[in-house]
Amino acid sequence: MLLETYTAMLSLRFLLLAAVVLWLGSGITIIRPGERAVVQRFGAIVAHPYPGLWLGLPWGIDRVERFSVQVVRQIAVGYDPARDEPFLGQFLTADQNLVQLQLAVHYVIGESDRELDAYLAQRTQAEGVLERLCEAAVAEWVSTHNVDEVLLTGNAALPIWTHQRLQQYLPAYQLGIHIQQIHVVWLTPPEEVRPAFAAVTQAQTAIGMQLLKAQQQAEQRQRQARALAYRLDQQAEAFRQSLLQQTGAEIEQFQTLQRALGRSPDQLVLFWWQEMQRCLTDLKIRGGRVEPIDAQAHPQGLDLTHLLRLRDNPSR
């Protein structure tokens, strides 16, 4: 009987010792790479450990909250086709049209001590506040653009605008997060008017194709005109150069002939008779008419005095 009582007491002591060891061991926390921790002691923040082994006070005294600061989190803002709520995520444009729009917002938890404290205090409502702020930024942008601009440029312009607006809004709310990236997931007109918008889009695409084709044809014609102008310029320049060369050759030939005739009177007489022969031959080819004189001939014959009168009085 005494042995049994002793054994029971020993077992109870062993259990108590194991419980104390486990309780003391609860103060040991392993913080993995990519994590930051916030240590609360009786509710007050006392430390912000980095990755590694943290030795604190046991459970019930210290409470360690670990956060993955390198994990990118995502929330969806706006329209959700999976929900049976057609008006959720609809925004009114500047020309009083509705568009259905959904954004995907990626964010991370801040790594500084102040940001960790802010996220610890706001973590239960951080995503809800972020969603409301995104909706406000989207509504502001959509309300200042007509529906065509929203549908055509929203995928590129809206994420940039929303990111800039959130950078202005977030510091006042102290959520302890940073926006990494925003992109448009869904951007369409409502289901009821989607066929009409599709027809307008097709018409605008056809017009754009026609304009592009006309522009390409105009550019092609401009290139052809420039090529033709260049070719004509080259031909004119070549003709000018040939005329200059021909004229230079004729001048040189005339000067050579002039020097030769100046040195030999017999050559001058021969040249004169050659030129006379050429003139008479040309006159024969024209039927014996000398146009500047025969134009003044009368039925009675050529009146040379008429030519003299014309010289003295050109107005007659």
Image (cartoon, helix red, strand yellow):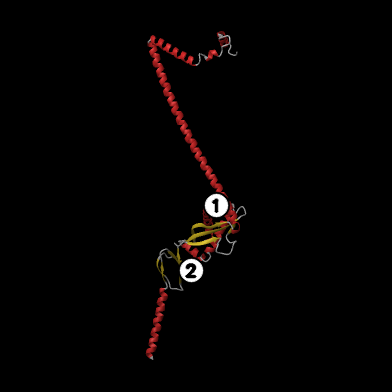
> In the displayed structure, would residue 45 be above or below residue 224?
below
| Residue 77 locus on image (x, y percent) | 54, 60
Which residue occupies 49% across, 64% down? 119
Q: How many labels does the image show?
A: 2
Where, by quadrant of the figure, is residue 46 drawn?
bottom left
Instruction: Report how far apart the C-alphas of labels 2 and 1 lie in the structure.
Output: 52 Å
Residue 216 tag number: none
Residue nearest the observer in this picture, 15 or 251: 251
Mark 1 crowdedness (10 Å alpha carbons): few <14, some 14-19, many ≥20: few
Residue 44 tag number: 2
Name the image quarter holding the C terminus: top right
> In the displayed structure, would residue 293 be above or below residue 8?
above
Residue 152 tag number: 1
Q: Which amino acid does label 1 sit on?
A: Leu
Q: Can residue 144 be seen in this view?
A: no
Which residue occupies 51% across, 62% down? 75
Mark 2 crowdedness (10 Å alpha carbons): few <14, some 14-19, many ≥20: few
- Residue projecting furthest to the bottom: 1
